[in-house]
Image: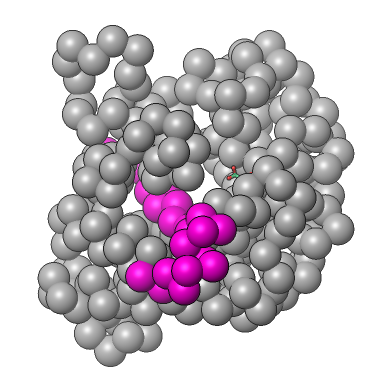
Amino acid sequence: MNEVHRPVLAANWKMHKGPREAASFMEGFLNLHPPARGAIVVIFPPSISLVAARHAALARTDIEFGVQNVHTRESGAHTGAVSAPMAADAGATWGLAGHSERRHEFGDTDEMIGRRLAMLADSGLRPVLCVGETLEERENGQLESTIRRQVEAALGQVPQSRQESVLYAYEPVWAIGTGLAASETDASEAHGIVRDAVRGTLRSGGAPSGSAGSATGDEHITVLYGGSAVPSNASDLLAAPGIDGLLVGGASLEPESWAAICAARG
Ligand code: PEP
């Protein structure tokens, strides 16, 4: 993990916890997690539970909230959808785009993911672009080409002035929810590929305005790791080169295990 930057520890609750359960989780978690522990803690509840979770943590400015998905448009006749400006209005300051469950279960294409990412960035949310290969792609030697395609297609759609606000999560599909986390070596290698793909995209479209680092390649590109991160492997993952934080699904659902991950140090 980069010494200068605080790790980002992000909880993706997926389709778990309605408003009451979300509020009671927050109560339990906040008792276990004292303020100012150094990490940036972000929770991504289902959007229907965002306000309740946030309300339960109003006294704690060290905890931030995000949405798991947004529509590609600001408003309109899109039954069942939530837009990025609405999420911001509800108190979200972060948003995910491109989670593999969105790609595989809901058919999100690289093009749609890019538009969601742009919408998050335009609405002032911190976008997190999730990328990662399937087991088949890894076994076919397509790790690098898959990550490059996903990064280039999505980041290329974000206006240059906003590209530097994007964070990345490397989430190998074979590691999500399987109990088989990537090794630190494999994760570090993939994070290097993500960074390289980001730099390449920034350069090909020109450096984002105001980002002096982009031209020289010394900008900080934040890349989180996701895929079966649990309390017992969190410290090792956070200590691995190039891993700036964790995006956690299953182990973020209980206050105890989530607090243990938030207490992990790289
Ligand atoms: C995720 O869905 O983003 C994830 C990383 O899940 P899990 O931690 O359960 O593997």
Q: Which of the image's four quarters has the C terminus?
A: bottom right
Q: Residue furthest bottom?
A: 216
For the question of whether residue 13 can be seen, the reply is yes
In x, y percent, where is residue 166?
36, 57
For the question of whether residue 161 can be seen, the reply is no
Q: Is residue 63 left or right of residue 195?
A: right
- Where are the magenta residues, as a range? 122-145
Q: How is the image coloured?
A: one colour
Q: Is residue 196 left or right of residue 13?
A: left
Residue at image location 67% in from the left, 65% down from the top: 182
Q: Quadrant of residue 56?
A: top right
In x, y percent, where is residue 60?
65, 37
Ligand 1 sits in which quadrant? top right
In x, y percent, where is residue 112?
25, 40
Residue at image location 72% in from the left, 28% down from the top: 26
Residue at image location 58% in from the left, 24% down from the top: 15
* Residue 262 vertical position relative to residue 80 in the rendered view, above or below: below
In x, y percent, where is residue 237?
71, 68
Residue at image location 55% in from the left, 78% down from the top: 189
* Residue 172 vertical position relative to residue 219 in the rendered view, above or below: above
Q: Is residue 143 magenta?
A: yes
Q: Nearer the viewer, residue 107 or 234?
A: 107
Q: Is residue 28 left or right of residue 181?
A: right
Q: Is residue 97 magenta?
A: no
How many numbered discs sit on the rendered protein? 0
Q: Which of the image's four quarters has the N terminus?
A: bottom right
* Residue 65 vertical position relative to residue 20 in the rendered view, above or below: below
